[in-house]
Image (spheres, rainbow, N blue to C red):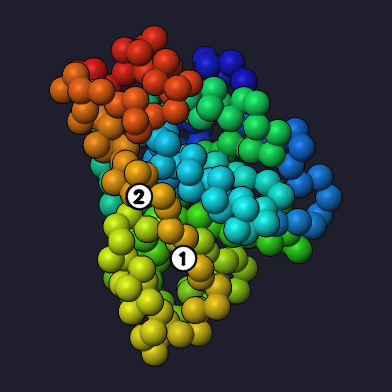
Amino acid sequence: MKPEFLSGEIEKLTRLKKSSILLVRKAPQGITKRQGRLGIFPASFNPPTLAHLSLIRKARRLGNLDEMLVLLDAQAMDKSIIGVGLEDRVLMLKRLFQRDPSASIGISNRGLFVEKLEPLRALYPSPIVFTFIVGFDTIVRVMDKGYYSNREKTLDRLFGQCEFLVANREEKEKHSFEDIFSREENQPYRDKVSFITLPSRFSFVSSSLIRENLQEGKSVQDGLPVPILRFILEKGLYLG
């Protein structure tokens, strides 16, 4: 997909009132039949970091995933638009996963997970199993009743169609995770959620910290994959 065409397609996607997903790369060796396990990793990827890669690798192994859909959120929950545009983030993801035979790349125009289900099913019909890969802060929002008019009905629908792999950002979050799902209202969903512990060197790597360091001229080599660092320097992104 050429950059100028991609820009137009992204503009169309963000204007749609219906929940939609634009697939910009289909894994050449992903799920080819109507069965298998799909990992779905939604994030802003602003920019993609080594922590993102570490989580993808571990989720693939622990979740026994046949394909990974890296899903760029055009309207991420609780986040304002900062950093660089969606086009550059798509190009970064394509460069990062261009040699990965089981990685697909898409763009979603909705932030709520339950809103993603219908367009995901259009691309990956049942009985393909969905596994969302998220950080701890995201699962906290998923379980927060403030996001729903009918929490029980919505969560029953969500967890009835998918599982979650949840990654830590700090060591204490494992205890907080167990506390959340020990609550009576959350116990029906406990067997659909698993916790992943990332290597300590990645637990504090975040896109926001990378952006700050780039703006301040600090080294980011410990937080960025080489293809992403090269892309950023080539285009002068995040440098203020």
Cα distance between the residues tagged 2 and 1: 15 Å
**Which residue in the structure is indicated by mark 1?**
195
* Count of numbered labels shown in the rendering: 2
Q: Is residue 120 found left or right of 236 in the rendered image?
A: right
The residue at 76%/56% (across/down) is: 36
Q: Is residue 180 above or below residue 105?
A: below
Q: Is residue 138 above or below residue 70?
A: below
- Which label number is shown at residue 116? none
Instruction: Locate residue 240: give its quadrant.
Output: top left
Q: Is residue 93 found left or right of 183 in the rendered image?
A: right
The residue at 65%/32% (across/down) is: 100
Secondary structure beneath dot 2 equals loop
Specify the farthest residue to the right. 33
Give the class, few, some or many, for how many residues have Cα within 10 Å of label 1's Cα (few <14, many ≥20): some
Q: Is residue 129 above or below residue 29?
A: below
- Which label number is shown at residue 200? 2
Say whether disc 2 or disc 1 marks the residue closer to the N-terminus. 1
Specify the farthest residue to the left. 216
Q: Position of residue 130 (x, y in %)?
A: 63, 59
- In the rendered structure, which amino acid carries the disc numbered 2? Ser
Give the class, few, some or many, for how many residues have Cα within 10 Å of label 2's Cα (few <14, many ≥20): few
Instruction: Locate residue 35: give its quadrant.
Output: bottom right
The residue at 76%/47% (across/down) is: 31
Q: Position of residue 197 (x, y in %)?
A: 43, 58
Using the rendered image of the protein, determine whether residue 44 is visible from the camera's viewpoint: yes
